[in-house]
Amino acid sequence: MPVTYRLKAIFACLFFSFCFCLANAQVKKRVKHRPKVDSAILELNSRISDSILNEKEIKDTTVPNMVNKVETYSFSLNRAENFFERRLDTAGMFQGLSKMERGLNYFHNKLERNDNPLNLRNLNTASVLLGESRETMTDWQKSLDFYIDQLNGIHQLIRTVKQDSSLLNDSLNQILHGEMSSVYERSLSLDSVYHTAAIKVNTLRNRVSINFLLVKDLQTTIIDRQQAIGQAMWKQEESPFLAFCSTDYDVTIWDVITDSLGRSLRVIKIFMATTWDTRTINLIIWILLLIWFLVTRHVVRKKPDNESILRNLTFLKKSAILSSLLLLFTYGSFVYESAPAAYIHLNEFIRLILLSILLSFYLTRAGKIILYCVAAIWLAFAIDDLLVDSAYGERWGLMLGGLFLMGLCIWMLMKKTIIFKNLEDSIARKWVLFITLIQIIISIVCNLTGRVTLSKLFAFSAIDSLVLAVTLKICCSILVDAVYTQSEVFHNRFFAFLNFVDLKNKLRGVLWIVAIFVWILAILKNLTVFDRFSGIVMYFINKPRTIGSINFSYASGLLFILIIWISSVLSQFVNFFFDESHNPVPQKKTKLGSIALIVRISIWTAGFLIAVAAAGIPLDKISILIGALGVGIGFGLQNLVNNLVSGIIIAFERPIQIGDTIEISGKTGTVQEIGVRSSQISNGEGANIIVPNGDLLSQQLINWTMHNRNKRIKISFSVPYQSDFRKARDLVLEELNKNQKIMRDPKPAVTVDTFANNAVNFEVKFWVPDMSEVGTIRNELMMDIISSFSNNAISMA
């Protein structure tokens, strides 16, 4: 390559290198000075934003905009003033809280004292009252929290007005005639009101919170004391009965009774003041019961056959008011989740008075003596159950009352004394007396060994279980009387076929199950072991159990069985109400049988689905069960499933209905019942024919009354050849037209059937509107034809 070209190439490389270095230096210089440029840009943007905001503020401070702003602020302040005028009524809270604080201090001091500790009954009463106080304070806390949330919202509106500096613009204020300054001053005044209300409400909320914590602490202490006393009451508390003396006790029995009754009255007042809502519900239920009893009894007394109806009644015919009150004071106390012993005993005392008045009409002389003795023992044991302290006379009273009650129970068990007159005795009488005897023997033994708390609990439980058993029997009788009276008052479809015997058999079983449950519940509460017993039972039935890969609990199984049982009871009641077998009059065609079948199937289906859902049975297990059922159907349940499905088809398609006269397989009768699996047919001779539903659909069925009850009748007679045939026909037609029970459309017809050797055979055809009267009409017509032929000298062959 020539030298000239080499020099040119080198020179070009140097030039491009110089340019690259110069460009690189410029880039570095720009990057070095970039923060200054960015800060300048940000400052410029800030100035632009400030100018925009200032321009917006200038626009907002114009007269039209300020007028709108003043109106908006005035509306907000009006809302605030209305809110403060409707201020929370804290006076009642302060008053109630003051009373509650005194009671809490009393309980706290009583629990701290060791010289005179609370017994188990008093601890239970204190626990109930503390629970009521806790619920009251919980409601107060919710009300205060809600009010404070509203108060904070109102304060935010006031602050918005107060912090708006545009309201201090004097030039605009002069234009708006001082409205801006007025709004601003109102905001300052309402802000002061807010702070005053906030201080007051927050102070009240803090007091409620402190007392709420104190209640929780006292409840914990009481639970610990109850557990300790529950464990200690099985041990000897005082001297044995044969070793104690009057010097062991500081106070007399009369002082203890006076102090305990006064304290019980205060407890009742406190409890009634906090449970008015539950008593209101009980009062409403009692009013509805009383109206029901009075109305039905009044209607029954106006009926011409009222004596036959009232003869089947017992207590309801004596007094509807006393009967309804007895129901109220028997079941009303169980509505309370927890109630002090003093309030429960007051309800039971009123119940005892009502029971004595109602039973006085049905007691023999010996029965009245027994009732008075039982009432006196109950009153003594109820007062003893409320005593706070032990006394010398209390031990003797427990022993003498226990011995007397034990002797009374043994005497009634050994001798079959007639207690009731015109009132059936209960089959549970011996069992009740036996359980009462066991409890009172335990009470006597505990008193002998110095276990006074156990003695008091078992003594009152024994006498109260005896009184409650009699009361529950009377309550069941009152409810049966009420339903029976209702059935006689309203002669509608549901009550037309009720009779007293069936009513007692179907209703009494359910009422006795409820009565037994209530009786056991009362005994557990009297012995103060209900919470412990229910806890053990709930733990046992709710404990998860496993069989293979299946997880279950007894609670789910019991719930499943209970729902299925309820479905069965409802299905039986539906079947009973729709069943016409009680009806003595001839059956008429009705669609109620099919409706009853549909309702029963629906109840069973809904009950099964609800039971499965409530018990928590997995659907995959149900599918396995259905698959197993399908296998069983394939092997031996075809006929059963066929009849079940046929019953459903009959219910919806209704080829037959109750009251239809049908003929199947040579058997004729009237449909009495359409069941799920089979149907009943009465053949008119006193026999019921059971026909599977599958046969009703698979075999040839003749339904004589599917569309109507019309029936065509044929009568044949013969007239000798020497007689006047036309006159004979006219006489028969005349008798057909005379009979008003024979239908005129289609018209009756008398036709010649055949010519015999010695006579002409005639055939009479006519229709009757009701096939149940076929025999009567046929007999009457034939007798009339014979009389007419005899009067007109026409002989019959």
Image: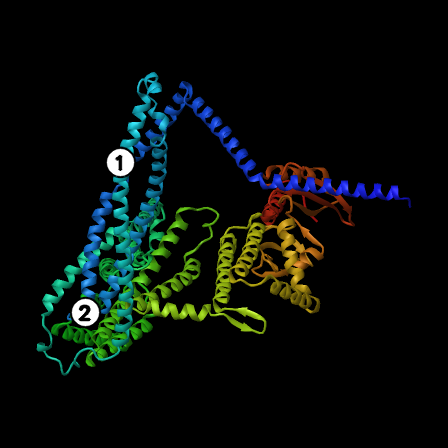
Amino acid type at circle 1 is: Val
Q: Secondary structure at mark 2?
A: loop
Q: What is the number of the mark on residue 425? A: none
In the image, 491 versus 114, the foreground residue is 114
Q: Residue furthest bottom?
A: 243
- Please say whether residue 97 is visible from this viewpoint: yes
Disc 1 vs disc 2: which is toward the camera? 1
Q: Looking at the image, is 545 positioned above or below residue 501? A: below
Q: Secondary structure at mark 1?
A: helix
Bin the neighbour count of mark 2 within 10 Å (Cα to Cα): few under 14, some 14-19, many 20 and up: some
CA–CA distance in space, label 1 to label 2: 49 Å
Give residue 585's position: percent from left, percent from top.
Answer: 51, 50
Taking the spot 12% from the left edge, 73% from the top edge, the residue there is 393
Residue that badge 2 annotates: 117
Bin the neighbour count of mark 1 within 10 Å (Cα to Cα): few under 14, some 14-19, many 20 and up: some
Taking the spot 16% from the left edge, 69% from the top edge, the residue there is 116
Residue that badge 1 annotates: 193
Give residue 760's position: percent from left, percent from top.
Answer: 75, 45
In the image, 250 versus 643, the foreground residue is 250
- Please say whether residue 668 is visible from this viewpoint: no
Q: Looking at the image, is 409 positioned above or below residue 51? A: below
